[in-house]
Image (cartoon, rainbow, N blue to C red):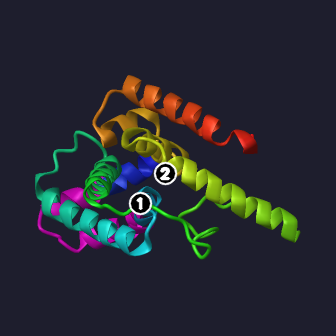
Amino acid sequence: MINDRMVEDNELVSRFQNGEENCFDELVERYQNKIYSLAYRMVHHHQDAWDLAQDTFIRAYQGLPKFKRKSSFYTWLYQICVNLCINFSKKSARLPTISQEQIGEGGVMNLPSRNTPEKDLKQKKLQAALQSAINQLPEQQRAVFLLRQYQGLKNDQIAKVVGCSTGAVKANYFHAIRKLRNLLQEWV
């Protein structure tokens, strides 16, 4: 299915590059939820994530005529989003926080409900602890962790997105997991 999607993406990109600008709408439709979700997981604020997702598609639209297909469209789009989020985080003085309203929304890991109030409360506390631990990861480790765990990208795809080697992706993921285990000791 991924290969079929890549072929479809390549066809849409080719058609866009040949003047059919409406093909970009299909690409936006296809990836807007994933890009928003990635941005939200990186910046933890709805409006900022929405703005970053929009900026991602604006940059993609502007850069698509020169897109050389050295990677898949999907990987290229994720790279744009990750870079925008990292730059935003560096510029922003705001530290990500989690409000009660955000717990359990699409931006925080959703754990299955066990229907008892005690278990629901414990799950919400675990979700908040997990999000807090993820927030404490260095930028590169957080990006690698989120792309692998929440977006399902493979190491070679992540390497293209974050602009490093596959070995560096593996090392960042290893260190992220180790740090998360330490930060979440009381939950493990």
Residue wearing tag 1: 95
| Residue 14 in sight | yes
Question: Residue 55, image x and y in percent?
Answer: 25, 67
In this picture, residue 145 sits left or right of residue 161? right
Magenta-span inclusion, residue 20? yes
Query: In the rendered image, which quarter contains the C terminus?
Result: top right
Three-letter code for the amino acid on which mark 1 is drawn = Leu
Above or below, 172 relative to 74: above
Identify the residue at image location x=75%, y=60%.
123
Q: Position of residue 67 (x, y in %)?
A: 16, 50
Provide the residue designation for mark 2.
135
Q: Secondary structure at mark 2?
A: helix
Which region of the structure is painted magenta? 10-35
Count of numbered circles in the view: 2
Rate crowding at label 2 as few (under 14), some (14 to 19) or many (20 or more) other CA atoms within 10 Å. some
Q: Residue at x 28, y 59 (%)?
A: 88
Nearer-the-camera pick, 38 or 18: 38
